[in-house]
Amino acid sequence: MGSLTVDCTKDRFSAKELAVIMGISWQAIQKRADQEGWPCEMETGRGGKRKLFRRAVLPVDWQARIARQRAAQAAAAIAPESPEMAGYRAARNYLEDLEREKEEKRLIKERGLVEFARLPEARKREAEACWEVLKAKDAFIEAGGFGRIQGAALFCAQFNEGKIPLDDGIVEIVNKTGKLHPSTLYRWEEKYETQGLAGLAWHYGKNAGRTLLTPDMQDFIRAMILEHNRVSVPKLMAGLEARFAGQEIPASHVVWRWASRWRDENRVLLLSIHNPDEWKSRYGAAFGSASASVGRLNQLWESDATPGDIMLAEGRHTVIGMIDVWSRRAKVLVVPSSKAVAIAALLRRCLLDWGVPEVLRTDNGKDFTARHMTRVLESLEIEQDLCPPFTPEMKPHIERFFHTFSHGIVELLPGYIGHNVAQRKAIESRKSFAERLMKKGAVLDVKLAAREFQEICDRWIESVYHQDPHGSLDGKRPAEMVRSWTAPVRRIADERALDVLLAPAPQDGGVRKVGKKGVTVNRRHYVNTALIGYEDQSVQVLLDYADVGKAYIFAASGEYVCTAVDPDWSGISAADLASHAKHTQKKAYAEMRKEARKLIREHKIALVPEDILAHRESLLANVEELPQKTVEYSTPALKEAAFAVADADRTPNAQALAGRIELPPEVLEYEERQKKVVDLRQKRRERRVFANNEEIYCWILDRIKAGTVTETQKQWKKEYEAWQETEAGKARRKPFTSTIGIRALTGETAEAAL
């Protein structure tokens, strides 16, 4: 194959070499490398510089393909084979490569589901709209028998004319990009093949987490906030200017936005440092209570719901069932009458427990064709076989299972266990139960809670149905059929790919705040020590209705946090959980406080005030003062004092001392130095200090108006105005510097400028 033209025994590969190995364009390779930030090495060759990626930084499935091709190349180099064996081996390798490529594409789509589940709702709608358009295009080309290029062009023309009957919401989203063009469809197809469903979202995450602050600046701000929780933005700016003098400091609003976000994300940690008592009162862990599952396995699944409903203690419920036709193993879920969420929950549980089927056969009701269901089936390459309405005979295996279920489960219900009832009455009661459960619209009253009835159903399936000989299996048991299957079973590699089958918790779109008792939903408290550190933060809570004792917790950013449990439903000791939670929380926050103190020490936060003063003093050393105009100032009191001095000069003693007095040379020299100091101080008082460049600019404008401006001053004005038009000047990120000094600008002498 073409991929063997690349030497796979080496450790570094270029984008073009990887494109040959993976069978995709080198542009797609480079784009993914840029998006995921793969480390690379630059190499200079005949065509200039190129990026080389080490095998270790490539995706795991890419590394596996390279390893396989390296092994094939090594085997081919050992010894020549006979033509027959070479042809046989080539054909086998070809088929194996086809199967691997198919599996790799499935894994890509699976990972796309993981990323899709993390997208905001707006981005999800965009991806879904693109996916729906691609499906419509494929159906259009297949139905018309067009070629790929011709069909895409015709489809776009029909779509732009409004002749493709898609949902108005989908059309509205797609029309935001302008007229639909074949190149757009090709681009969407490439993204779907290389990134899965999430790749169809527009520009999502392109600038996420970017900031003008360098990592060192971010660490400095963290340390300042950890040491001084209420430190203001001006103080942060002053500290940055002092510590990172000579570097470009971002504008204050950038610092404010970053610091505000970090404070909000770490408010509980900050509270534990600066107010431990309040932290313990508000967020101290209070989890629990200290006092107290044709021709092969998974080839075809069938799913349906019982026609009748069951009235349980919590209200009307329905039984949803799933069966693997080959083994006849089954699984049921007792849920409220709203079934769309329940079907998704049962499918999720079967996918995790049984593996991935090839075909899922259901009826075409809205509960089985919901968008999130078809999206998962498409991404996992599961064919959905929709039966026509009112044709239960198209799903005979699940229908037969429900008949067996309705006759068998009755023996485990209250009124049939531990009672000496006449055989005729028991048979009549069983018949009545089964008939009503299998009759559409009927409601059967069972004196049980939903959890208790679900437990009875599960126990009956595992201990009775799966262990009893089945007539259609030649007397074999469903459990025995499953154990007899030794071929590989496709499994979900990442459970997060099935998160779209989970249901948001009721109310507020499933958003909850982590409190002292974990996450509360329907008066159930879901807890996990991984929630420590998320106190008072909003999280997305998704529920698996196949196991209501668990809740799947996601951070606001979409990242998976943990699977939380309700101790009362999971069987975990509430007292043990409480003790473990408090110990874990104490250890976690002690470690965070230790890191905080380390960060404070590394950045020497205690020296920041002195650094700021020294930095500001160094700036003042470059400031020169201009001469200041003066006027004589006098008051009556000053005049009287002058008269008194003059009068004293006329006293006899003054006249007596009017003669010449000889002073020692050192005294005369000292007096001359003092006179010069006084004179310089007086000249300094008469100079004016400019607060900033704006005042100098205004001063020059005044001199232009007065006609006293010099060429030097005109040149300074020209430089300042040019700086104001630059990006740095507009954003005020860098201070203005001129080639003209302050003394040359004002025309002072060196002595006057002292």
Image (cartoon, rainbow, N blue to C red):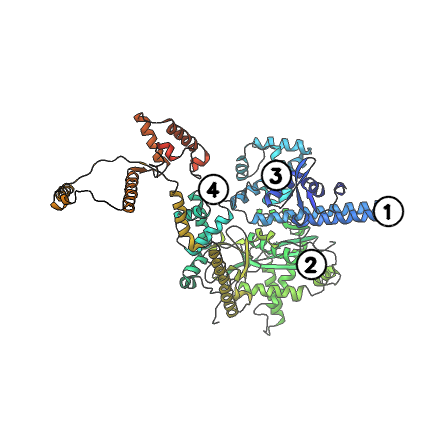
Q: Which of the marked residues, 3 or 1, is nearer the chain's N terminus?
A: 1
In the image, residue 664 sits, relative to residue 491, either above or below, namely above
Callout 1: 10 Å neighbours few (<14), some, many (20+)?
few
Residue type beneath disc 4: Glu
Callout 2: 10 Å neighbours few (<14), some, many (20+)?
many
Q: Which of the marked residues, 4 or 3, is nearer the chain's N terminus?
A: 3
Question: Which mark is nearer the camera, 4 or 1?
Answer: 4
Q: CA distance from mark 3 to mark 2?
A: 40 Å
Question: Which mark is nearer the camera, 4 or 3?
Answer: 4
Q: CA distance from mark 4 to mark 2?
A: 69 Å
Question: Which mark is nearer the camera, 1 or 2?
Answer: 1
Residue type beneath disc 3: Trp
Q: Which quadrant of the figure contains the C terminus?
A: top left
Q: Residue at x 40, y 43 (%)?
A: 619
Residue type beneath disc 2: Arg
Kindly identify which residue carries mark 3: 188
Asked if disc 4 and disc 2 are in contact, CB closer than 8 Å, the reply is no
Where residue 81 is drawn, which disc sits there? Answer: 1
- Quarter assignment of residue 181: top right
Kindly identify which residue carries mark 2: 328
Asked if disc 3 and disc 1 are in contact, CB closer than 8 Å, the reply is no
Q: CA distance from mark 4 to mark 3?
A: 40 Å
Whole-percent x and y of residue 223? Answer: 46, 54
Q: Residue at x 28, y 36 (%)?
A: 628
Kindly identify which residue carries mark 4: 248
Callout 3: 10 Å neighbours few (<14), some, many (20+)?
many
Q: Which of the marked residues, 3 or 2, is nearer the chain's N terminus?
A: 3
Asked if disc 1 and disc 2 are in contact, CB closer than 8 Å, the reply is no
Q: Residue at x 56, y 49 (%)?
A: 117
